[in-house]
Amino acid sequence: MAKKKVIIKKTKKKITKKKAISKKKNKSSKVSKISTIKSNPIEQIFKENENQLISLITKEFDKEIASKAKTYIKSYSKIEDSIITVNDFINYVENHDEDLFKLFKAYSTSTEQDNSSSNDESEEEEKTTGVKSDDPVRMYLKEMGNVELLSREGEIAIAKRIESGLDRMMNSILECPASIDILKLWIDQVKKNEIN
């Protein structure tokens, strides 16, 4: 009985020593990670972009395709002001490597066919069960899934339309003589420190 207590105490001491050593290692690795982040934040951002793009490609395609595109992923992730999306990356690859681009397109068309057949099966299952959800959140998410998201070009086009609308509005306002009189009045009030 006494031997068992001694053995248990020794093992507890060993476990606490191992925990202390592992805590020290974790602290030193955290310090080294923090120092690398502080020393070169741009490289850290590039690395995060690269990891994000690899995970996106792996989710949407396959690990093999991600490994084949590794060099292009590194170069694409270092482009400043690049938005990390799979479609933009595929466009980037199209300009640099036609064979890899064809591989991406072949894989995406085969997955689209698989998805369309699985969607047909799921719709049939929903019809057979006859249960429809009255949950407003589910209904909202289902409707949102049917709406296409804007592409980069679409967002740019909308921004240009907004900007041209603002320019037309300002030109229309400044063409009116009454607005010019109000602007002159405001300028005089600012000069007299009546308004800020």
Image (cartoon, rainbow, N blue to C red):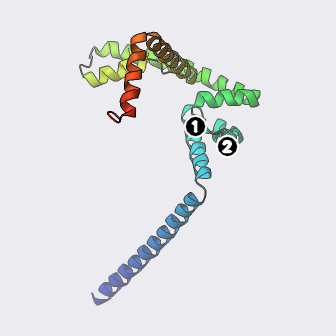
The residue closer to the viewer here, 155 or 137, is: 155
Residue 165 x %, y % = 48, 14
Q: Residue at x 60, y 37 (%)?
A: 81
Residue 23 x %, y % = 44, 71
The relative height of residue 78 versus residue 88 in the rendered view (above or below) is below
Q: Amino acid at mark 1?
A: Thr
Hey, which residue is sitting farthest left in the picture?
Answer: 134
Hey, which residue is sitting farthest bottom in the picture?
Answer: 2
Q: Nearer the viewer, mark 2 or mark 1?
A: 2
Residue to which mark 2 is pinned: 74
130 displayed left or right of 101: left
Measured Cα–Cα span from mark 2 to mark 1: 15 Å
The residue closer to the viewer here, 182 or 31, is: 182
- The quarter of the image holding the C terminus is top left
Residue 143 x %, y % = 36, 17
Residue 174 x %, y % = 46, 14
Q: Amino acid at mark 2?
A: Lys
Residue to which mark 1 is pinned: 58
